[in-house]
Amino acid sequence: MDKRKMHSPDLTQRNIDRIAELFPTAVTETLDGDGNPARTVDFDALRQELSDHVVEGPQERYQLDWPGKRAAAFAANAPIAKTLRPVRGESVDFDTTKNLFIEGDNLDALKLLQESYLGKVKLIYIDPPYNTGNDFVYDDDFAESSADYLARSGQTSATGDRLIANTEANGRFHSDWLSMMYPRLKLAKNLLAPEGLMFISADDSEASALVQIAGEVFGRNNVVATIAWEKRYTRSNNANSFYSVKDTIVLCRRSEAAGRIKELRSDAAAGIYSNPDNDPRGSWTSASYVNPATQAARPKLVYSITRPEDGVAIDHPTHAWKFQRSENERHAAEGRLWWGRDGLARYPRLKVFLSEMDDGMVPIDLWSHELAGTTDEGGKEVKDLFQGNSVFDFPKPTKLIRKLLGIFVPPSQEWSKDMIVLDFFAGSSSTAHAVLAQNAADGGSRRFVMVQLSEETPSASVARAEGYSDIAQISRERIRRAAAAIKPTVAKVSDGHTDIQDFGFRTLRVDTTSMADTSKTADALQQGELTALIDSVKPDRTDEDLLFQVLLDWGLDLSLPIKRSDVEGHAVFSVAEDALVVCFENHVSPAVVKSLAAVHPLRAVFKDSAFADDERTNAEQIFREVSPDTEIRTI
């Protein structure tokens, strides 16, 4: 039951609503005097609507603008004092897998990945929350000062997950969504390889705005296509007007390095090629030899063609041929003209050989449900994995994402088989499921990076009843179950031995930095804090927490293999076969230093508090003598 508003009607807003009905372009979103979002009238636009000539006003330029845009741009660039903490208990094959699952706010995650994955991701697919008035979007609270933002983003304290319901009543229905998307797209672009591609799903509510914002972030020339995906093929007569059976997928490229884009040739497309005449050049199909242009339009392409079977001169009564006479003579000499099985076809056709075709096919921007699946199929996949329980609403079908994985940048189809695939709105991890399935199908070695906020499941939902308190739990569990279903069918053979496909994932969680705040002045310290500040590391952090902070700070791949060993009673971690060795004991003896130097690591890291002044000098001397090329750091 709604609570009555015990005040008179807001006539101004009523009038704005009436103007919006007549002149929708004259109503916009802005901030009032107190900084609160509100609908208002663009009086310059309204004057233009009511005038029969061009009225004077602010200088016009082509752009997409909204309240909060500058703050959203700032949010993309503002630093954060956060890290990624490993969670072994929520991982599979933690030490060896190259797949990542990151739990936390994706804005934070994208910032933390900037060094380690800069320019390394070939394909990004995201299915962000649709702006329906019921879905949740990330509340980045852009209407705050830079100091407040830095404090909230982890410079001084931790914060919880930030979510809001983006209803039309809040006055910033479109602005909130755009402000949420803008910084994330800017950060995601940095992670793409020069020839990398990004696919973004949207429905009709924001598809047009998405194209504009993508054009601003990537450059208009790099918005390659807007693909219509037939997400369902039956209509509902309960709709008030048009019923939507499609979503839009916007494709952007990182740069013109992706000058050509192809898709893998489907079985259906390959099926049109055959070899009925046993041509030694292999399978072929035929193409029309008749030009769409008339003889009057293309008189130089009008001539007679002799049919070999009976020597009859063949002319088309109305249209020209597609090729000049010299080209036709070459086709005839090379046996490329097909006159049917009996050799007496009315007109010739040109034989097109599969062996001479470029890798793949030119993609089209209309994807049917037969080729790319439906939302119903996506829901069924989840139900089948979870014993008939619908633990997640409206997941994308893996068939759709596998079609995306088949898009590649020439010259080689192998481009698509060895790539990092990022999805920072992971949801139920349809993308990870699709990567595992496609690797199993074609022997690829694709790696996935999933990012999902630990958004709570509704209290009355099936997911909650099944024991899943947040979406990140569902997402990880789906990967485990999908892997278990696919694994028995897969074994890749390489160099004479069986190499099992990577079905694991390393879970990392966004958290505040592992380093203690040692920047306080003496008068700001509380009693008892001086002892704690002897160590620059927070007391609740493990050695593995510190290891991943080092990987981030050094910009190293977060999926590098890790080995833990014991050296002289000290815990030592080796990353990527001694590319990095770390020991975070509070005191490191010379014997341990010598042991680590003896493996000649590229980098070595210790805690700053592990050495007294003379011990630090001795450790540096040991490395200079034993492994002079090693780069040494302390934290």
Image: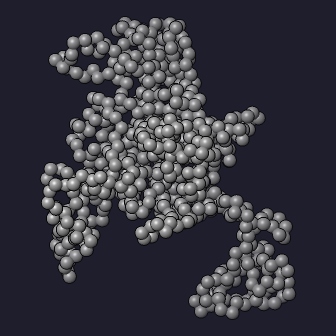
> Is 392 placed above or below 532 here?
below
Q: Is residue 420 visible?
A: no
Write down the quadrant of residue 362 in the picture. Answer: bottom right
Judged left or right of residue 517, residue 90 is right
Q: Residue at x 73, y 64 (%)?
A: 271
Quadrant, the C terminus: top left
In the rendered image, residue 50, in percent from the top left (x then y), is placed at 19, 78
Q: Could you tell me how many numbered marks the image carries?
A: 0
Residue closest to the eye, 352 or 378: 378
Q: Position of residue 102 (x, y in %)?
A: 47, 36
Residue nearest the viewer, comparing 400 with 602? 400
Residue in the picture at 47% in, 44% down: 461
Residue 145 at x, y = what percent? 21, 41
Location of residue 526 (image quadrant): top left
* In the rendered image, the vertical position of residue 460 relative to residue 27, given as above or below: above
Looking at the image, what colour scheme do you see? one colour
Looking at the image, which residue sits at the far front? 1
Residue drawn at the location 50% of the way across and 14% of the way down: 571
Can residue 303 be seen?
yes
Q: Name the residue: 50% across, 66% down.
A: 236
At which x and y percent is residue 274?
78, 66
